[in-house]
Image (tube, rainbow, N blue to C red):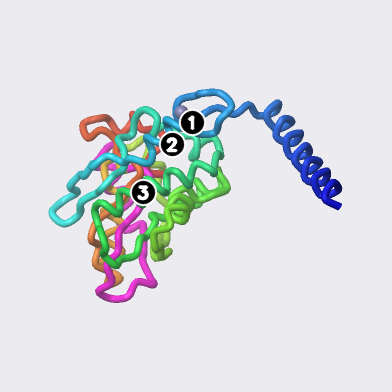
Amino acid sequence: MRQHRAMAVSLAELARRAAADALALVLPVSCAGCGTLDVALCAACRRLLSTPLPLTRRLGPRLDVHSAFAYEGEPAAVLRALKEDGRTSLARPLGLALAARAASVFPGDRMRYVAVPTSPAAMRRRGYRVVELVLRRSGLPAVPALRTARRTADQRRLGRDDRARNVSGSLTAAGVTPGEKVVVVDDVVTTGATLSEAARALERAGGVVVGALTVAATPKRGSARDTATSED
Ligand SMILES: [Zn+2]
């Protein structure tokens, strides 16, 4: 009996290894952050993602954006792999970075986190919602309170003023209790136009927006054009 069980386990293990080997032949894996072979996310990059930086940017008088990383190097590469290569397992380490940043900014506060909604075009292109997925994997208490009210042009080709005009009035909010504290969540902050619009919609619905939280922040003086994957 014992022998049978051992054999069943080893057959299952063999089958698992064979499947993994077959997959590796088709899709060689490399670290999403640094390119090290045969690992989806290496130990060094995992460690890097587990220690977010204290980055904060002020967006107008009442809204601070807290980010876990600058949009560069390994964190940017991991975010791009999630957004552009379909590597959705990376949502968890990025979500944990988001949660760690939230814990340092809003310790012990009771609030809910609201993802900036994915545009229908981005959803069609990828088949999944990046910000919602990262927020879900973060374990932070989330409420899907924001909706797209109208179509917007692709932000990637627009400068600061055009981005603000493009997203103005593009979001609506519902499902927030009046006076409830909320935090707006996005993957990358570039000009902050989308986050400001999200905060406006949430406040209009009665929420108290205590801040914004993103995985990454683009360098402040950089051109919006440098960040081909942000704010869409
Ligand atoms: Zn790595």
Q: Which residue is mark 1?
A: 42
- Magenta residues span 159-188
Q: Position of residue 122 (x, y in %)?
A: 50, 46
Determine the CA span between mark 1 and mark 2.
Answer: 6 Å
Check disc 3 and give the amino acid type. Answer: Leu
On residue 203, which mark appears?
A: none
On residue 98, which mark appears?
A: 3
Residue depth check, mark 1 versus mark 3: number of the one nearer the observer: 1
Q: Examine the rendered structure and indicate whether residue 7 appears above or below residue 25.
A: below
**Residue visible at 49% across and 39% down in the picture:** 82
Determine the CA span between mark 2 and mark 3.
Answer: 14 Å
Is residue 165 in the magenta section? yes
Q: Position of residue 127 (x, y in %)?
A: 58, 47
**Residue visible at 20% across and 44% down in the picture:** 57
Q: Which residue is mark 2?
A: 46
Mark 3 nearby-residue class (10 Å; few <14, some 14–19, many ≥20): many
**Mark 2 or 3 closer to N-term?**
2
Check disc 1 and give the amino acid type. Answer: Cys
